[in-house]
Image (spheres, rainbow, N blue to C red):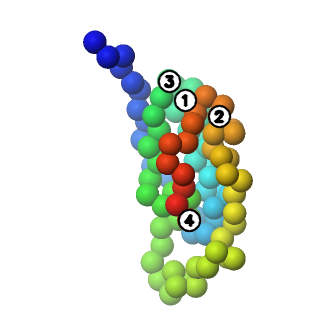
Amino acid sequence: MPEPVTVAAVQMHARPRCVVENLAKAAGFIGDAAARGARLVALPELFNVGYFVGPELFELRPCHVERPDPGMLSARHPGISERCPPSF
């Protein structure tokens, strides 16, 4: 019989265009889930850049977005590996 896997689903508010802040918040949730035994943590769609609709959506350009360090989430939690990189 296969070994059971504990899965966690994260629900969080992501501030639009605050990538570093949003990743730090996600890292905290990942750490909490891992401490409770989660082996897989699912984050919400657009957790990194925030989900917003309005005129500012069309003003979003790479120069306006904070750039995080690659692997920021796995660096904070060595036992966790990133399977899907955040979308930018």
Q: Nearer the viewer, residue 13 or 43?
A: 43
Q: Which residue is mark 4?
A: 88
State if disc 1 and disc 3 touch (CB < 8 Å).
Answer: yes
Q: Residue at x 48, y 29 (%)?
A: 39
Q: Residue at point 47% right, 38% down?
A: 41
| Snapshot quadrant of residue 80 | top right
Q: Kindly identify the amino acid type of the residue bearing the numbered disc 2.
A: His
Q: Is residue 14 visible?
A: no
Distance, label 3 to label 1, CA atoms, is 5 Å
Q: Which mark is residue 37?
A: 3
Instruction: Identify whether 12 is placed above or below 32.
Output: below
First of labels 3, 4 by sequence position: 3
- Neighbours of disc 1 within 10 Å: few (<14), some (14-19), many (20+): some
Residue visible at 28% across and 12% down in the picture: 1
For this orientation, the residue located farthest to the left is 1
Q: Does residue 78 lie above or below 65 as drawn?
A: above
Q: Amino acid at mark 3?
A: Gly
At label 1, the amino acid type is Ala
Residue type at tag 4: Phe
Q: Residue furthest top?
A: 1
Q: Residues within 10 Å of mark 2 (few under 14, many from 20)?
A: some
* Alpha carbon distance from label 2 to label 1: 8 Å
| Mark 3: secondary structure | loop
Q: Which mark, residue 51?
A: none
Q: Secondary structure at mark 1?
A: helix
- Whichever of labels 4 and 1 marks the residue nearer the N terminus, that label is 1
The CA distance from mark 4 to mark 2 is 22 Å
**Residue assigned mark 2:** 77
The quadrant where residue 8 appears: top left
Q: Nearer the viewer, residue 54 or 83?
A: 83
Instruction: Measuring from the top left, give residue 37's x and y in whole percent.
Output: 50, 24
Q: Which residue is mark 1?
A: 34
